[in-house]
Amino acid sequence: MNPHPDTPQHDTPPQHTTTQARARRRRAALLAAAVDLLTEGGFAAVTHRAVAHRAHLPLASTTYYFTSRDQLLAEAFAHLVETELRTTRDWITTHGLTGLPHHLATADRTRQLGLWELYVHAGRDPVLQQIARRWTDGCVHLVADTLGLPPTDPRARLLYTTLSTLWLEHVVEQRPLDDTRTLLTHAIENTLKPP
Amino acid sequence: MNPHPDTPQHDTPPQHTTTQARARRRRAALLAAAVDLLTEGGFAAVTHRAVAHRAHLPLASTTYYFTSRDQLLAEAFAHLVETELRTTRDWITTHGLTGLPHHLATADRTRQLGLWELYVHAGRDPVLQQIARRWTDGCVHLVADTLGLPPTDPRARLLYTTLSTLWLEHVVEQRPLDDTRTLLTHAIENTLKPP
DNA sequence: GATAAACTAGGACACCCGTACCACTTCCTC
DNA sequence: GAGGAAGTGGTACGGGTGTCCTAGTTTATC
């Protein structure tokens, strides 16, 4: 939460931290800045200069710690996916699947937009594509766990497809939340009832 | 299909066409070029220069016929949506819903990617957002018609959510087509069987 | 303490971008 | 036919981009 996690101290160089630790912190700061920019302004907002400026680091640090912008984006995507999976898992375990619409309503919309933006972009980049698959698999696994089904159960897979679209539509089109809620309960009933 | 629909003829100006018709053709050529570029290289590929070059027209023509790049993108999106809806409707009426995976397999993947890319981007632009809503509504309507349901039937809405995700995943993640097929048949059975 | 390695910081390069400008030609209206 | 509007095409401007280069500083290893 420190806004200046590693501002260079020209006058008083750090003493009780090794430079390696400092470098690690800087790299993490750059990554966090990239994620933030991605969620705020979308894909095009993640530029070397913007990232460096956000992290309070010189421009060249971005090319030093990341070989290219693509690599930076890939790592940012992976980071975002992991964070989002963990957050959603926590939320579901305490509130259940039916509470998801409320989660959608309270969550940061631009953040979700950035995630989806990168997801679609993954269709044009093999590296990102692999992360996108991990994302889908993680979500399906999450749904299966919540329903007490094996991860390969097609019912979990199907319910996730509905969940996914409802989520995407909520983020992109900003449809009324009540419709999403009723549709979701419909879907859950459908997948569990007809044995 | 003519690669040079309106190449300027410096030496022999057109005679049997008025300039207004020529201008209309030029505008359409620019729009088509924008759609092509969008589907090929994604969002960032649609630049004034690239569009003009693709349409074999001078750079300034893009700013003459479109007030800004945003307007050009919006019109390209609308055009793409309309075309895609019509194409899919034709396909479904002749092959049925269960044949959709085959349609996905044969359709131009990059084109679909461009469509989704723009769809997600619509979350950041109110004008595009409206087009995105029209797209979803059109798809739901299409599904409802095929199933013989009223357009407001939640079952059509739900089936579309599954369809949508399967489609998106196929385009982005390139999952094996067989899984998509079996999941789709599952979903169709689920939505129609359990009254 | 010397030497190599890692890191920092600023600037520069070449490129592409959206858009504006300006002569020029062609068409439509009176 | 005259004059204004519409359309055409080449170019310039200011700005932002990814990446590279280089000189300086700090740290780790011998």
Image: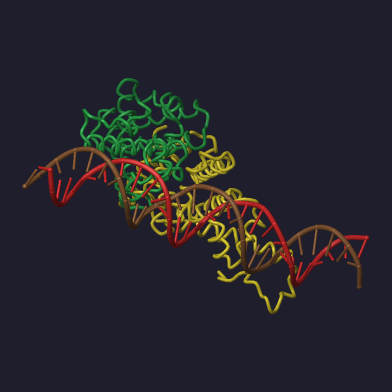
Chain colours: A green, B yellow, C red, D brown
The residue nearer to you, when weighing A103 against A111, is A111
In the rendering, at what x and y percent does residue A138 appear? 28, 37
Work out which quarter of the rendered image holds the N terminus of chain B and state it: bottom right
Q: Nearer the viewer, residue A183 or A169?
A: A169
At horizontal 57% and vertical 38% (from top left) the residue drawn is B126
Q: Quadrant of the C terminus of chain B?
A: top left
* Left or right, B133 with reference to B27: left
User: x, y percentage for residue A9?
Assistant: 32, 32
Left or right? Give the position of B86 relative to B14.
Answer: left
In-front residue for pair B4/B101 = B4
The residue positioned 52% from the left and 45% from the top of the image is: B142
Could you say which is closer to the camera, residue A149 or residue A47?
Answer: A47
Residue C24 lies left or right of residue A182; in this view the side is right
Q: Quadrant of residue A39?
A: top left
Residue A62's spot in the image, x, y percent?
34, 45
Residue B95 sits in which quadrant? bottom left
Vertical placement of A94 versus A35: above or below? above
Q: Image height check: is A177 above or below A41? A: above
Residue B148 in view, yes or no: no
Q: Position of residue A187 (x, y in %)?
A: 40, 31
State the count of labels. 0
Classify residue D16 as left or right of residue A31: right
